[in-house]
Each structure stands twice: as structure tokens, then as C-alpha cells.
Image (cartoon, helix red, strand yellow):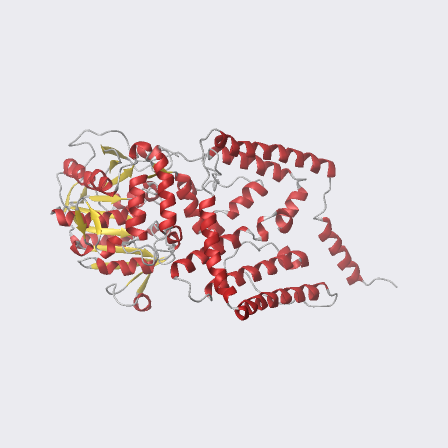
Amino acid sequence: MSKTPDSGKAEDDERSTVEQYLVKDPERFALNMARMVEQAGKAASAWAEPREKGEVRDHVAEPVVDMVKTFSKLSEYWLADPQRALEAQTRLFAGYMTVWANAIQRVSTNAEAPDDAVKPERGDKRFQDPEWGRNAFFDFLKQAYLVTSRWASELVEHAEGLDEHTRHKASFYVKQVSNAISPSNFILTNPELFRETVASNGENLVRGMKMLAEDIAAGKGDLKLRQADYSPFEIGRNIAMTPGKVVGRSDVAEIIQYDPATETVLKRPLLICPPWINKFYILDLNPQKSFIRWAIEQGHTVFVISWINPDERHGAKNWEAYIREGLQYGLDTIEKATGERDVNAIGYCVGGTLLAAALALMASEGDDRIKSATFFTTQVDFTYAGDLKVFVDEEQVAAVEKSMNEKGYLDGTKMATAFNMLRSGDLIWPYVVNNYMRGKDPLPFDLLYWNADSTRMAAANHSFYLRNCYLENNLSRGTMELAGHTVSLGDVTIPIYNLASREDHIAPALSVFLGSKYFGGKVDYVMAGSGHIAGVVNPPASNKYQYWTGGAPIGDFGDWVAKATEHPGSWWPHWQSWIEAKDNTRVPARKPGKHMKTLGDAPGTYVKVRV
């Protein structure tokens, strides 16, 4: 019987599909596998050597134990009732049967491609290669994975009787495990990786294992995942390059004053208190993205606190030290440099939380130098504190404190890993696949350079933060103890501009909204589009995103959002109008060093200390 043209074409297509997964040069492939094993030995050595010397102590068991405990509580609910357990198993089995039936239908000669049992969530970039849908094997893997991960998430969602913290942790850990076991992360189950490995005869794996060894060595025994090509960037050359001078230096902070860009400036100087969990130059990445440079161009005399990257010498530096030697030292320096006592202040993230606590302390001590406060994605109430709360309960905080007390600080890589885990599907696994399996160098990206420039946490400071904010929520409760005072946000009566970001996973917009009610004065709540970084660093020239304004931040958050007015573009000009409405008095521009000795050029020395 002769073949029809269509059947012959189908056979050719099938042969072509199969051939792309066959090794063309077995000898070269075997040689590259040997080279890969050699590089794997170097990676193992880079991991083992600092442990053999006692330079690294593993604390991997601690989060794993917490995850096992959390899953045990989840299992108790489902296994306590046999009928409930059977129903859960039946749902999973039914999903698998649908996947299996679809797979059988796909391989039938005349069958149309069936609808997937479950589809990836919108924005999921893992399964974009056509082979995930065209090839029956990879399509089966994809659907089986999605059915399983969706089922696991629903187990958490529908488990009754779990306290909210345990449910939050269970949801977070399920997401981490689901992201880790995705078939897109493995050579034999990812069609794109499989094809690249075969096409290059395994050279991609040689390059990838070499990069893995380099990254473990760079992390001094821990994996320091590279998310970008960092080589083109240098702080002070093409990062953090706004001109200025260091005009003050304490044990925990350098105070930077920037050169003016206008002939006259606002009479009130502006003091920016950034987070110490990462470095201040997120607000000065480059001239196009720099909030600092933009603020100078609007007529602000800008001062910025550049926090120390602490080591064992700073272990006892607590929140009071950061207030006295950072914030208030900055105010003292501003007065010496400009003669002005009245100041506008900005706090970003934990820098904003510190600023809020400092304002409460200063109110109790009669220090009224800060006349208005702006908070960027700042929490003062931690009831709905986002995914970072997963890492905070008594057992975990005690474990972190034990680890910090050994050195006087928490390693910067620990905090960097925690932040990356909040978005592991974007900040971990794509780079694992790209770097160590595809063997490709990541591209240069200034934001990811900043993200990788991690900082250590002084032990006393970080312990105070975890316990008083995340664990006990003392700041909003009015029970935080600072410098012998029990401080209250109700004593803070100055005008406040409270900026949240709609998609923020670190300081959720709801959390920022609810925190507004604890201040004693008027609070203007503004919600920017995007997340914790892009929602803040959104220059007007980019014409991106939007922001919302509305009435007072009281009542139900959903109602506020529903009634709020949406504005296109950046919130920066709106903030500038708010500042000018408080005091628009102008004076001749102030040049750094006119009234005091300077200590070097911006961005200073503290910011250049790397982990």
C-alpha cells in the first residue's frame, strides 16, 4: 500500500522531532561529560574546603526542620479524617486521569489536541517553548506537574483549623517546593535544555558547572547565585554617580550632601534614611533612574545616610544606636552644613520603620527638627507583613540570634537568599537554569548588580527589628522601648506622605494602609503601581505605571482602592507638590563643604564595602 503525501510528511516530522534529541557525536559528548565531572569536583571542593577549615557552619537543617514541622501540621488536618483524606487523594487521582486521557488522545492518529487539564498561570514563562505543547512526552510532564502543584496549593487553602501563621508558612513552602521540582529545571525534562545539551554535545553543562564552582568560591562555601554580569559596573563610576561630598561619618553611617543643580533651593533640606538591609544607591542607580538626582533638580538640598556594612565590631549596635548615630547625627550634620534646623525626611522600607520609631522617640524628647516625613513602602504595623513573616516566629528568631551571636552579625548572603526566595520563580530558578544548565552568562543589569550587593546585619540591630516589629508588633501597639522611653506613633503629629506599592510582596499595600491610622497627625496615603522597587524608582520621564490618590486612609482598604483616583505615570511630581505645599520658601543654593570640612567624594567609602 502506498503512503499518502500527508502520512509521509507526518513521518518526516516525527523523525525530525526525534532526531533533535539524539546525540550526534557520542565521543565528544562523553569527553564533555568527563570535563563536566571535573568541574563538578571543583565545585564540591569549593563547598567543602571552608567547612573543613571551620570557616563555614551549615544551618540548612533549621529551615528544613521548620518546613517539615509546618507540613506535619498540614498533614494532621487531612489525615485526621479518612473521608477527607480520601477526597483529597481522589481529586489528585482525577487530575492525573485527565492528564493520562489527554496523553492517550494526543498520540491517537486522528485525534485533535485536547485542552490541557490545567494551564500555567498568566505570566508563567517556564513553558513557552513550543515543544511543551507539541511533544506528547513534555506536554504530559508539564500537565502532571501543574496538576500536582495546584493540588498541593489547594490542600493549604482548604485546610481548616490552621492558624494564619502556619497557613502562611505552608503556602510559602509549598510554593518553594513546587518551583524547585518544576520539570523546566532539569535537563531531561525540559525540551529546550535537552536540545541545547544534545546540539552542543554537553558543552553547556561544562560551562555551567564551571560557573557553579566559581559562584560557590565567590560565596566562600555558599552558593552566591549570579543574576547579572556585574563586571561593567563600578560604584561611583557608572553607579551612584550623582556628585556630592561626604560631610559626616559615625560608626554606623556616612552622611552625604549632594551638589545643587539649581540657583535657589528649598529652605528645608531633605534627609533620606534608606534601609540598611541593602544599599542606598537604589535611589541613585544611574542619572536616568536616580530619585536623588531628580530631587536635586527640583531644588532640594539632599542629604543621604549611607549605612555601614557592619562586621563583628558593630554587633552591639542596636536601634537606639542607629537613631542616635545615624538619623540624629544626620540632622546634626545638616544643621552644621546649612544652618537649618527644620528638615524634611524620607524613610525607605526598614529605614522608614526606623524613621517612624525615631520620630516617636524624638517627640517624647522634645526634638522637633523633622517637619514632614515621607515613607516609601514602609511598615509600622506588621499584622499583614507579607511573605517575610514566614521566617519569623520564636523558634526561627532564636535560631537567627544564635547564629548572629557567633560573629556579631548575620551574613549578607542569608538576607539576600531570603529576599530571593520571596520571588524564587523570578530570582532563583531562571538563573539556575540559565547559568548552570544552559551555561550562559547573565546579561549586565544595574538593578540586579544592586540586588547582589548584599549587606550584613548587626546582631543587636537585627534582633531588635525581628522581635519588636515582626514578632511582637510593638511599634504599632505603643509598647516599643527605646532609650528608656515607651514610644508611641500617636505622638507623631507632623504631616506624613505614606507611599505604598500595589504589588509589593515585602511591605504589602494593605499593611502600609493599616499602619497609617497609628500616627497622630494627617497622613496622605498614595499607592503606586508595580512593586517594592519599581513602584518607588519610577522617574517621570519613563512614563510608566500609575499611582492612586484618595481620601484619608481609614476604613476598609478595598473600599479606599475602589474609590481612589488613578493617575498615569510617576508619583514623584505629586510628592513634590505635597512638599512644596508645606513650605516653598527658597534660599540660595548650598554647596557641600562651605561651612565644614568634607571627608571625600560621594558616594563615600561605606557603600563600597562588599560582603
Work out whether residue 19 or residue 433 is closer to the camera in this orientation and state it: 433
Front-most of 172 and 75? Answer: 75
Q: Nearer the viewer, residue 147 or 132?
A: 147
Q: Where is residue 140 in the image (x, y as percent from the top left)?
A: 64, 59
Res. 12 image quadrant: bottom right
Question: For this view, does 11 lie left or right of residue 288?
Answer: right
x and y percentages locating residue 254 in the rendered image: 26, 35
Residue plotted at (58% across, 37% down)? 209
Q: In this view, does 246 lie above or below 116?
A: above
How many labels sit on residues?
A: 0
Quarter of the picture containing the N terminus is bottom right
Whether residue 5 can be seen here: yes
Residue 333 image offset from top left, x and y in percent: 18, 37
Report the quarter where the C terminus lies.
top left
* Any part of residue 275 in sight: no
Q: Is residue 59 left or right of residue 353?
A: right
User: In the shown orientation, is residue 281 left or right of residue 65?
Assistant: left
**Residue 227's spot in the image, x, y percent?**
47, 42
